[in-house]
């Protein structure tokens, strides 16, 4: 038996924490690329893009242009962490 879920109506289940990445494809600089991120990072990336009023693909392109010495998925994770700590802007 599962414990009851608290919260008000419309409040969904707590976010699922999964280490399994989800792969999505984007075009950056005219080249198609696939990016694998965990759901929590995709959600944070979408929220950041919405806050900055840019498409997710444009935000990814900006992060790609700024990265040095790491893969794009790692660069996105680090950018999101820095942003959450107030260091990215």
Image (cartoon, grey):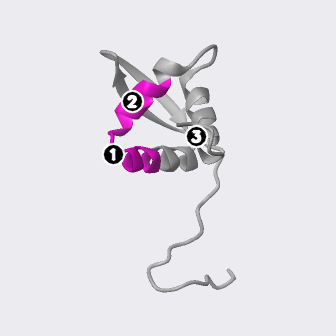
Q: Residue at x 35, y 31 (%)?
A: 58
In the rendered image, residue 10 lying in the magenta stretch gets the answer no
Question: Going from the N terminus, do you reach mark 1 or mark 2 first?
Answer: 2
Residue stretch in magenta: 46-63
The residue indicated by pointer 2 is 25
Task: Say which mark, if any, is on residue 39.
Answer: none
- Mark sitting earlier along the chain (1/3): 1
Decide: few, some or many residues near mark 3? Use Cα within 10 Å; few <14, some 14-19, many ≥20. Answer: some
The quadrant where residue 77 appears: top right
Q: Residues within 10 Å of mark 2 (few under 14, many from 20)?
A: few
Give the alpha-carbon distance from disc 1 to disc 2, as whole Å.
Answer: 20 Å
Task: Identify the mark at residue 80; answer none if there is no mark.
Answer: 3
Element under disc 3: helix
Whole-percent x, y for residue 15 in the image: 58, 62
Q: Nearer the viewer, residue 86 or 34?
A: 86
Task: Left or right? Give the position of 77 relative to 22.
Answer: right
Residue position for label 1? 53
Q: Is residue 36 above or below residue 2?
A: above
Whichever of labels 2 and 3 marks the residue nearer the N terminus, that label is 2
Discs 1/3, front: 1
């Amino acid at each position: 038996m599962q414990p009851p879920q608290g919260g008000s109506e419309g409040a969904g289940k707590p976010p699922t924490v999964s280490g399994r990445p989800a792969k999505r494809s984007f075009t950056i600089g005219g080249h198609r690329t696939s990016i694998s991120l965990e759901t929590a990072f995709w959600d944070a990336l979408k929220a950041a893009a919405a806050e900055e009023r840019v498409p997710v693909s444009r935000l990814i392109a900006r992060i790609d242009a700024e990265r040095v010495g790491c893969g794009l998925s790692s660069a996105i994770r680090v950018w999101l962490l820095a942003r959450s700590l107030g260091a990215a802007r």
